[in-house]
Amino acid sequence: MTTITDAILLGYGGSEHSKTALAWADELAVELSRPLQVLVSALHVAAVADVPKEYQAAHVSDELDRILASAKTENSAVSTVLRSPGEALVDAAESAYLTVLGARTQGPLQSVLNGSVSQYVIRHASGPVVVVRELPSARTGRIVVGVDGSEHSLRALEFAMRHAQETSRSVLALQVFKQPENATDAHIEQAIARVFENFSGVRTEVRRVQGIAAEEIAKVSGDADLLVIGTRGQGPIRTLLLGSVTQSVLERSACPVAVIH
């Protein structure tokens, strides 16, 4: 498969969720003036007797070509691969700007994002992975990022700030504490301030709320264009499942979620 450098990479499965993710990726490609590369795995096409896998994927690719003909971006490409979609996406993600997946893909092309594949891509992809569960009900111009002072959450904040700078959006850094005595933390405040200083011109806000992190982060998703969360991964030992906060936010969010290592 020929990969396009710095493209918006989309894993496409032919379902309505894939089409929603495609619409989001298409708009982002136009907004950032980046190419859109769509990947289809022929291994995940429903079986048809005596028909080679590469031909079974043809109807999905044909449909995708028709959809892309009316897309907003003028620079798009479709690649069909005969290998695991998770592995193919992870490899292609090395040269992509970010990778986009639909929340579910139960359609003509079997799950590009079932539990194991989505977790594989999120845990192993070298760059940001955006999971599109549904499109925002209204554009707010706000990116929300959960920050707890850890290194991976600060990398998430850096991505949110950079993305906000490139797309003319604002950033809300959300801190969630369990006990009132943890409402303020000088270490976290200083870390956030240092990241903010590197991105002049981006409108920022810091909000501190008491509660359960996954619930509070998901709660603000209805008033955001994008949620950004950090997750541990890519170490010598990886957990089989995503962290509980990451998993819960992906399941509850009312807007696209960017997961950052």
Image (cartoon, rainbow, N blue to C red):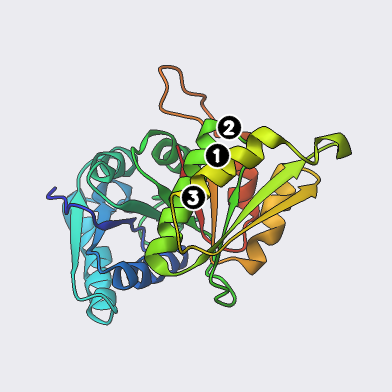
Give SS at disc 1: helix
| Amino acid at pointer 3 | Glu
Give SS at disc 2: loop
Q: Quadrant of residue 148?
A: top right
- Image coordinates of residue 30 in percent, x first then y, are 30, 73
Crowding near the residue tagged with mark 1, few <14, some 14–19, many ≥20 C-alpha atoms within 10 Å: many
Instruction: Name the residue beneath numbered marker 1.
Output: 153
Compared to 73, does 247 lie above or below? above
23 vs 217, left or right, is left
Instruction: Name the residue beneath numbered marker 2.
Output: 150
Compared to 202, does 149 lie above or below? above
CB atoms at circles 3 and 1 under 8 Å apart? Answer: no
Q: CA distance from mark 1 to mark 2?
A: 5 Å
- Which residue lies at the image location 39% right of the left edge and 40% below the top edge? 121
Residue 197, label in figure: 3
Q: Earlier in the sequence, mark 3 or mark 1?
A: 1
CB atoms at circles 1 and 2 under 8 Å apart? Answer: yes
Give SS at disc 3: helix
Q: CA distance from mark 2 to mark 3?
A: 18 Å
- Image coordinates of residue 205 in percent, x first then y, are 63, 59
- For the view shown, which residue lies furthest in the right direction? 180
| Amino acid at pointer 2 | Ser
Residue 51 appears anywhere in the view: no
Compared to 39, does 211 lie above or below? above
- Image coordinates of residue 155 in percent, x first then y, are 47, 40
